[in-house]
Image: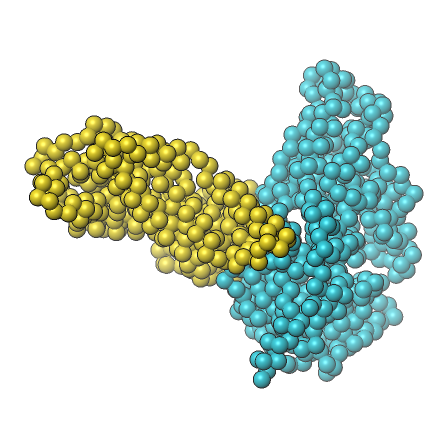
Chain colours: A cyan, B yellow
Amino acid sequence: MWILISTLTMVLAGNLRYAEDQAPAIVNPLFGSSMAEARINELLFQSLYADDPELATIPLLAESGELSPDRTEMTVTLRSDARWHDGTLVTPADVVFTIRAMKEAATASTEAGRVAFISEAVEAGERSVKLRFGRAELRPEDKLTFKILPAARFKSTTVKRTDAFRTAPIGSGPYKLLKYNEDNSISLSATTTSAGVAQITMREVSDKNYQAKLLLYESLEALVRVLPRDLPLLQNNRKVELYPYQTNSWWYLGYNLKREPFDNPEVRAALGMMIDIDALLAPIGTGDRLSGPFVRSSPFYNHEVALDKKNSAGAAERMLQAGYTLEGGLWTKGGRPLTLKVTAHQALESAQDVAINLQSQLLSAGVKVQVEFLQDAAWKSRVWSAREFDLLLSQWSFDRNEDVREQFYSKGSRNFVSYSNPAVDVLLDEARDAADPQVRKLALRKAHQAIHDDRPMLFLWTLDSFAALSTRVKNVLVHPFYFFSFVSTWEMK
Amino acid sequence: MTGSRVPAGSETEEARLGLAGSRSAPLPSWVVPTVAGFGSFTLRLLGAALLVQLLIALAPGDAVDLLPNADQLRPVLAAEWGLDRPVSERLWLTLGRLARGELGTSLTYRPGTPVTELVVQGARHSAAVLIPGLLTGLVAALVTALWTSKRVVSGRPGGPELTGFLRSLSVVPAFLAAFLLVGGFNAAAWWGIEHGLIGRPEWFALPDTDSGLRSALAVLLVGVASAGLTEQHAALHAALRELRAAPFIEATFARGAAVWPHLLLNLLPVLLELAASRSASAIAGLLVVERMLLINGAGAMLWQACLLRDVPLAIGLTLAAALAVTTARLVADLLRLWLDPRLRSVL
């Protein structure tokens, strides 16, 4: 009877198939390393707090949270009806286990950084857990968005990647794992019969260029992000609906400040003036030009900072000040023409178009440019570890917290361009420690101005993003980062 | 009975294809030690595994680099995965693990999953394309060679023309042609569906839907691409011409008895040699075919394993491929020994 009801529900509510370039390598939030994994974890697992449709923080597994007056402790009370997929209750022990497992060095969790602000987690009653922080936290609930795991499924807080949990993950999310399929797809089924989408299937479609076609061919129902060149194709189709969403992602050209001549601010300023950023953006889509490290809709974006504009005369003046002379159409110093290499990640959509356009623009301005595209492992080894590059063409993506500290703090772990400004460090510290949101906003806006003036990178744009879904799927609201956060409201006929 | 009439040009053709002596000359030098023991066999497998590990080690970046917080995780994971040791030491460790029969677990492709499990999964998908592909190539080559050799020997037209056509096939970029064909099929079918001319075909959309047409395309590509059909046809054609001119065939013909059973029996060693020699290039072709038609076989998996610097998985898949090729050659040579007493006398 149950099978009959389930089958009937699935037929009525449907199976939503969405595409990923690469199937999740592992379904265990302790070891997530890609957006494909983040999206499937969003379906299977829940966090203490999450975003509402306005992207404000709301309790999810938590029922309530009480912050101590000095903001260094928080007591979180769990919902009494929160259950794992096997029917057992979500308990404080699960929360404590998850935090300890993430922090455990031997686990080598990729999520360790997300719980670094928690110094200790202890059970504080049947439904409560007490979290102690390393320093006063302004809004700790904004950071309590990591997925909670069932402690009973693990032997200790030292969890290995080989742990059997990866083959049979149990979560508390709106969907549970049905099966891993032979074609690398993963099938999930709704945990309630009232779900608007009964089944979700993640399909691996490694050829990104083919994904939009599959949506047209009705072999998929959802595409997380449409390539700009596929937009016209999908816009004109009656069976597909496009959903714009705002991401906290921005493109930049980062200079290696440890290398000559990029350590010279005059050269950086000149290069910025040689580039027509609007002309770089136009062929790859639409978006907002930026003057600093935040998107324009961010409260931290400083609208008083002017956008960089192409200025050939200004560029020439700066190059002369930097000791360069124009010989044979090329800027030359000590008999050597200025030559730089632009390094981009192979997977960065449209990077090839931008790089070639940039190469052409700079050559006509008197600078020779070589372009190289690196695959993931090479990128992380050369750029992240060895910092072997001249000019990076890349993109940073942030969650709602828009924490750019690691990118611009002198000792930031993501500060690949080797930027260092003590005044900016002070502002970033001030923003981190601020108890008042206004103080934080002001500090980050000042940091925006200072970073723009130092020009460690040329800030380019944030691209307009679109998800595409079959018109069979109704009530769609997509989360800009995790995509499926509001899937419970979706309906499919 | 040694003075058979060998048609002019056939020896040159065989020599060009590296098939000279495949029927009556001594066996390749590696066969004897293989038959005698597993020394060479094992060395080849280990060589392939070590080469893959060395190439991945020389490529920039490693499996830890692919993780988001690689800097923090490196001390733990590099030690756990042996990436903190010099390459030479890693190679020795791999040898030790392989000697113990341990293939380990995947690092980044499917973290924690036993390599054996993944290899078996990939090999199953690939075998469904590889084996029919090899057979298709052989059968097509045999049928065309029977026809062309008969025409040439009898002096009737058609033989040289078909041979020329098959030769010209070898310069056709088969993978690109297939890619365009797939796109064409889909576009045409979509147009038909959109205009209400046809219903949705069961194979639609082609690279994404497991169907008879997709399987047929994959099998055909493995069998024909990389000049497979041309080379096999040339070899069989030369062998058949030689055989048709052999005195015992002429005698059979003069008696009015059926000739084809003798032809096929004498062709078996050549067919076995061809199947064995084609297996390596067919396995290599799988890399492209599986990527193009989105088949999750061992070829596509090896591609991903290399990109993700998943050394244990790449080694496991390479070993499986080397094992398949070496086993195919070993089995083919043993069968040839069994079928052809002249080869045994050479030994």
Q: Nearer the viewer, residue A134 or B272?
A: B272
Image location (x, y in percent) of residue B179:
52, 43
Q: Is residue A399 above or below residue B283?
A: below
Image quarter hosting the N terminus of chain B: top left
Judged left or right of residue A205, residue A455 is right
Q: Quadrant of residue B247?
A: top left
Image location (x, y in percent) of residue B44:
33, 46
Q: Nearer the viewer, residue B93 or A205?
A: A205
Residue sitting at x 72%, y 15%: A328
Residue sitting at x 68%, y 40%: A351
Confirm whether residue B91 shows in the render. no
Image location (x, y in percent) of residue A205:
58, 53
Residue extending farthest front: B197
Residue sitting at x 89%, y 41%: A305
Q: Is residue A94 above or below residue B330?
A: below
The total number of labels drawn is 0
Q: Is residue A472 above or below residue A347?
A: below
Judged left or right of residue A412, residue A180 is left
Image location (x, y in percent) of residue A69:
87, 70
